[in-house]
Amino acid sequence: MAGWTAQARRNGHTIGFVPTMGALHEGHLDLVRRAKAAHAEVACSIFVNPLQFNNIEDLKHYPRQLDEDRALLHEAGCDVLFAPEKEAIFADFTPRTYDLGVLNDHWEGPSRPGHFQGVVNVVERLFHYVRPDEAFFGEKDRQQLALLRHIARQELWPVRVTPCPTVRAADGLALSSRNARLDAGQRREATILYKSLQRAAELAFRVPVATVEEAVRSILAQEPNVMLDYFGIADHDSLIPLQDWGEQDKAVALIAAQVGPVRLIDNLTLAR
Ligand code: PAF
């Protein structure tokens, strides 16, 4: 990777970077196209990071399809694929404990202990090897994005962390590599996540926060096979749960639920 980066720099090119765990879908390819629109050179990584899985079954079943991914990346305009072995990326490396602050206190933080430390540690390693100018992340993982922006500022990482809109299927389901593990019935049931978020967006700022949460819970009750982990409304930037709307003109609704064999997450910005 170091040789490629050095050559790109010698050519006076800037580098856009899309880190992934593979099993690529249109959401990832959209990030690659955005990176290519802004930079002469685009690198993409595929690495299923064991540090960020707190569920061994999830890690074992995480979809892997390197040949197919390589072809998709080429078509989308990616110039180089970085697909390191675990031994290579973590050679001479001891994971650090980062100060994640309040951004780790809610939502995915308590539900997946250690997850964000694992994400930040691997992203630091990926940035270390690729040395990009700008890295592109999907808003679907809103808390991951907020944390990486926070850590990039705190640690003075010389990389711009850029948010990109969630890409959805025609029925609203946020694209995710894990969707591939849903059967047809579960796939249909999973659309309740986005329907709930849309209902929250309709009601936001018009009725109390608690009323929105009640309305969403009754929508979710229509799909007894969808096991809710959390639904809530949070401050748009700090992701601290909101008890009332206050003066803000924006907030965010976040949801996580188990659907069949997979845990899905989604979120939507709520605007006044
Ligand atoms: O969002 C992901 O796919 C992963 O969390 C990331 C950022 C590639 C780190 O492993």
Image: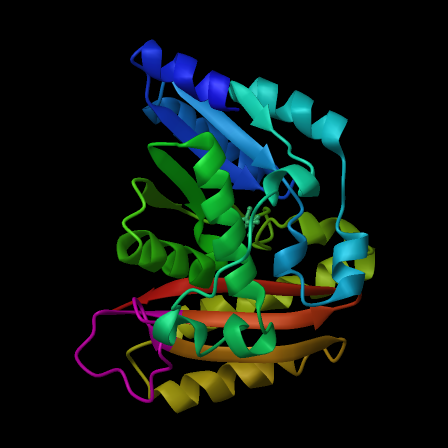
Where is residue 269? Give x, y as percent.
Answer: 36, 63
Q: Residue furthest left?
A: 247
Quadrant placement of the C terminus: bottom left
43 in relation to 175, above or below: above
Classify 159 as above or below 249: above
Closer to the camera in the image, 230 or 63:
63
Q: Assess whether residue 226 is covered by the magenta stretch.
A: no
Instruction: Count numbered badges in the picture.
Output: 0
70 is higher (above) or lower (below) than 61: above
Residue 75 location (% of width, % of height): 59, 18
Q: Is residue 40 left or right of residue 70?
A: left
Q: Is residue 240 on the magenta stretch? A: yes
Q: Main secondary structure of the magenta part?
A: loop
When asked about the image quadrant of residue 38, the answer is: top left
Q: Is residue 150 above or below residue 167?
A: below
219 vs 40, left or right, is right
- 121 and 190: which one is in front? 121
In the figure, is residue 158 to the left or right of 182? Answer: left
Q: Quadrant of residue 11?
A: top left
Q: Can residue 92 be seen here?
A: yes
Q: Is residue 182 visible?
A: no
Q: Which residue appears at 40% of the width and 68% of the height? A: 100
- Seen at 53% across and 31% down, the residue is 44
**Which of the two residues, 100 or 2, is positioned nearer the viewer here?**
2
In the image, what residue occupies the spot 80% across and 54% down? Answer: 61
> Which percent across, then down, holds residue 164?
40, 44
Q: Which residues are magenta?
A: 234-252
- The colour scheme of the drawn protein is rainbow
- Residue 201 position in % (x across, y down): 39, 69
- Taking the image as shown, residue 6 lies to the left or right of residue 245, namely right
Q: Residue furthest front?
A: 92
Report the residue at 21% width, 83% height from top.
246
